[in-house]
Image (tube, rainbow, N blue to C red):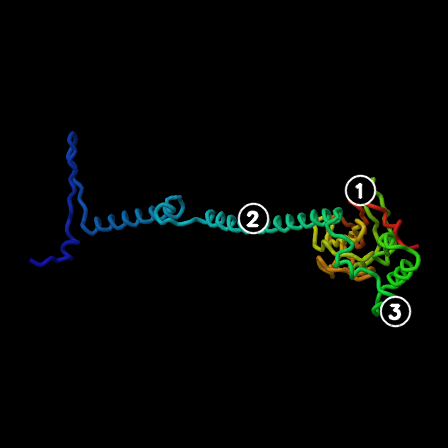
Amino acid sequence: MKLNFKEIFKSTVYITPNFPNGETVRYRFKFSQLVLYFIILALFIMLLTLSMLSFTPLKNVVFLYENSELRTQAARSVELEKKIVFLTKELESISSTNKKLEYAFILATSDSIDSTDAIYDSLKYEPLENLPYGGNIYAAFTGLFTKYFLNDSEVKTIFIKPSKGLIINEFNPEEGHFGIDFAVTSGSSVFAANGGVIIFADFTLDDGNKIIIQHDNGYITIYKHCSQIIKKERDVVVQGELIGLSGNTGKNTTGPHLHFEIWKDGRPINPKEFFIK
């Protein structure tokens, strides 16, 4: 017996619910109507399910799908991790710089470097006839002056001005100003005030590019806020040699200038007392 679908669609379906205590009711539907109702019900269930999966947290359970907020949080976590790595490196750099500064001051106030060491042989002034072309006139004059008028113990107490600028801030240790400031434009030459060994040449947060030179007899000189450091640590320099360029680097500066200090045995000294008049 072959099924005739046309006759099936034209047929009538009776639904009789079996209620225990009630009147028997019979519902009559055409088969085509019943199919249509089922299709509508199925579509309604599908739309309801899709809505729940799209607009409720159920989608994270069913599809293991990260919503936009989770993606944003993940992106923030990655960005935070990058910042933590960057700050860690910065802290390590600052820690390394602080250790170098501590070592520099320990070295400057100790007798670990003796003036008889071979490294100081190159710090002695050359005779005038052997002065290289381009040498500082102050260094030449100092060489003559110290050669004929001073003994070896007094030679080391003579310093030249590290800059050609005018002094705008004086030595005032009572207010925490342990040196003097020279008014100069950025990029002006900074000279070694005396011969010595560079024990620190690096950037610091407060003082910017900073240079410290160890001299004989317990003296050190400090040069702050440079725009550029020309020499490097452990370089031996002679008096009047170019060691950097002035600038406006670091937090403790209000404009281009060179801050210069002289220390002896851990105490700041007024640099003007040592300049050649």
The amino acid beneath tag 3 is Glu
- For residue 215, the mark is none
**SS state under label 3:** helix
**SS state under label 2:** helix
N-terminal of the pair, mark 2 or mark 3, is: 2
- For residue 84, the mark is 2
The amino acid beneath tag 2 is Ile
Left or right: 53 as drawn, with respect to 95:
left
- For residue 176, the mark is 1
N-terminal of the pair, mark 1 or mark 3, is: 3
Quick one: 122 or 131, which is closer to the camera? Answer: 122
Distance of mark 2 from mark 1, alpha carbons? 34 Å
Image: 89 above or below 237: above
Quick one: 60 or 93, which is closer to the camera? Answer: 93
Give the percent coordinates (x, y) of residue 139: 86, 61
Residue at the front extreme, as displayed: 116
